């Protein structure tokens, strides 16, 4: 099993540019999560999907952030326009709940630096 | 509001010692807890989980203890090795639908030889 795959692994961009982060969940998992990690705020849940449907996006910082899951094997997190305060590590995780609770498996993360 | 926190931000131990990492949670409705390990430059990695109908669960060199009375969770690592050096997070599930984990800030474990 390849695990959760994220791309790119590193992204450096300038303020105002659009950034697209990609995630391929573990095959067979029906839940997908996007997290942001910073030293100051730790791990923050941004949004999660069940069966490709967004369930809770209350963690999305603002309208500049959007996430999609067009099919069971692919999701994107887009930031437009990007700002320096968006610099963080963005993790994607997937899981499959037994009896309503689940373990989430994380990808390696995308390290984003907005200049 | 609900929160998951750790008693100590850092823990330093000698190789071979046993380590205990603590975590407090505030929501008595939480019924599923997970410990994750995050090494530098990597994503969090699942270590062990426990459901609220249990008070102890053992894995390979790791044991998780749950005290629902005082809303306390701990991770015990036996015979700590340098490879155990990492940040450890506890997480709780407060959503009965089953998918919203809330993470604590993390404890950094440093193991010296």
Image: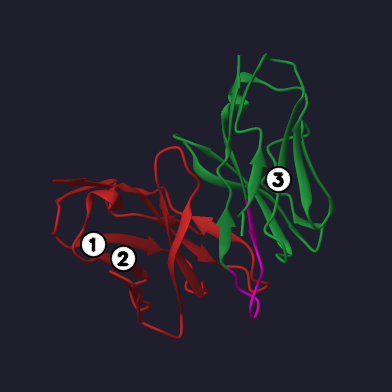
Q: Which is more toward the observer, B84 or B72?
A: B84
Which circle marks residue A1 in the picture? none
User: Label 1 marks which chain's residue?
Assistant: B
Q: Is residue B9 above or below residue A85?
A: below
Among the two numbered marks 2 and 1 on one chain, the one whose residue lies closer to the N terminus: 1
Residue highlighted by disc 1 = B20
Q: Which residue is mark 3?
A: A23
In the image, which residues are magenta?
Answer: A93-102
| Chain of the residue under the numbered disc 3 shown in the image | A
Specify the quadrant of the image occupied by residue B20: bottom left
Give me the disc on residue B75: 2
Q: Which corner quadrant of the image does residue A23 belong to?
A: top right
* x and y, in percent, of residue A24 in the image: 71, 49
Of the pair A77 and B53, the residue shown nearer to us: A77
| Contact check, label 2 and label 1, Cβ < 8 Å | yes
Q: Is residue B1 visible?
A: no
């Amino acid at each position: 099993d390849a695990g959760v795959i994220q791309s790119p692994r590193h992204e450096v961009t300038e303020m105002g540019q659009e950034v697209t982060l990609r995630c391929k969940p573990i095959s067979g998992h029906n839940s997908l999560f996007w997290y942001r990690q910073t030293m100051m705020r730790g791990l923050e849940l941004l949004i999660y999907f069940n069966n490709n449907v967004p369930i809770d996006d209350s963690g999305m910082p603002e309208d500049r952030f959007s996430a999609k899951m067009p099919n069971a094997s692919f999701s994107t997190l887009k930031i437009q326009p990007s700002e320096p305060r968006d610099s963080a590590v963005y993790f994607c995780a997937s899981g499959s709940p037994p009896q309503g609770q689940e373990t989430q498996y994380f990808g390696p993360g995308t390290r984003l630096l907005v200049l | 509001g609900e929160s998951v926190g750790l008693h100590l931000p850092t823990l330093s131990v000698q190789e071979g010692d046993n380590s205990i990492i603590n975590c407090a949670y505030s929501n008595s409705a939480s019924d599923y807890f997970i410990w994750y390990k995050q090494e530098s430059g990597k994503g969090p990695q699942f270590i062990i989980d426990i459901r609220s109908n249990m008070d102890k669960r053992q894995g390979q060199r790791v044991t998780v203890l749950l005290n629902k009375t005082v809303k306390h969770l701990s991770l015990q690592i036996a015979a700590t090795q340098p490879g155990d050096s990492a940040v450890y997070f506890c997480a709780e599930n407060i959503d009965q639908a089953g998918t919203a984990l809330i993470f604590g800030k993390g404890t950094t474990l440093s193991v010296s030889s």
